[in-house]
Image (cartoon, helix red, strand yellow):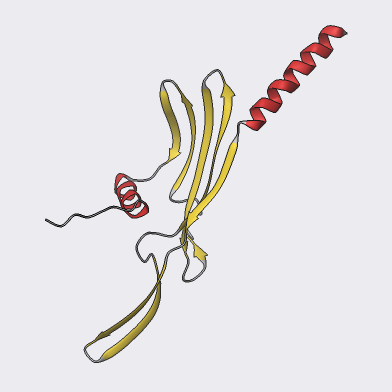
Amino acid sequence: MKKSLVALAVLAGFAGAAAAQSSVTLFGVIDVAARYTKANGQDTKQLSNDGSSSSRIGVRGVEDLGGGLKAGFWLEGALAADTGTADSSRFWGRRASVSLMGDFGEVRLGRGKTSTRLVVDASTSTPRRVWAT
């Protein structure tokens, strides 16, 4: 009987430690541009999506499995902030993946971003200093 109580206490301790080391993050970018152009005698006013980067919303998380291993997920979808709609073909269309991480690196399964999308997102999300020569 004592052995079962000790084993139960040890398992409860591990469950609490694992729950304390998990994280879930809600993230996103809302980018709307108000544009006014005057060309060829016509004034055009418009509200458009994706002013300098693409609008998106997502959820990502990591869970420590112990022994140096972590499990993660990433769900990210496109938003049209000017109309209030999401991608109609698939909501998590930008990225939907699960991963296992450790000393070996990361093994990721699912739909990831294309290389072009990675470059665009990296260039618009980090400020860069431009030097004039």
Q: How many marks?
A: 0
Q: Residue at x 19, y 54 (%)?
A: 131
Q: Is residue 39 left or right of residue 94?
A: left
In the picture as drawn, the residue positioned furthest to the left comes out as 133
Res 114 quadrant in image: top left
Res 55 quadrant in image: bottom left
Q: Residue at x 58, y 24 (%)?
A: 65
In the picture as drawn, the residue positioned furthest to the right comes out as 1
- In the rendered image, the quadrant that contains the C terminus is bottom left
In the image, is residue 89 above or below residue 44?
A: above
In the image, is residue 113 above or below residue 55?
A: above
The image position of residue 95, as x and y in percent, is: 44, 46
Q: Residue at x 43, y 64 (%)?
A: 31
- In the rendered image, the quadrant that contains the N terminus is top right
Residue 90 in view:
no
Q: Residue at x 49, y 54 (%)?
A: 28
The image position of residue 60, as x and y in percent, is: 53, 43
Residue 39 in view:
yes
The image position of residue 106, as x and y in percent, is: 42, 28
The image position of residue 101, as x and y in percent, is: 47, 27
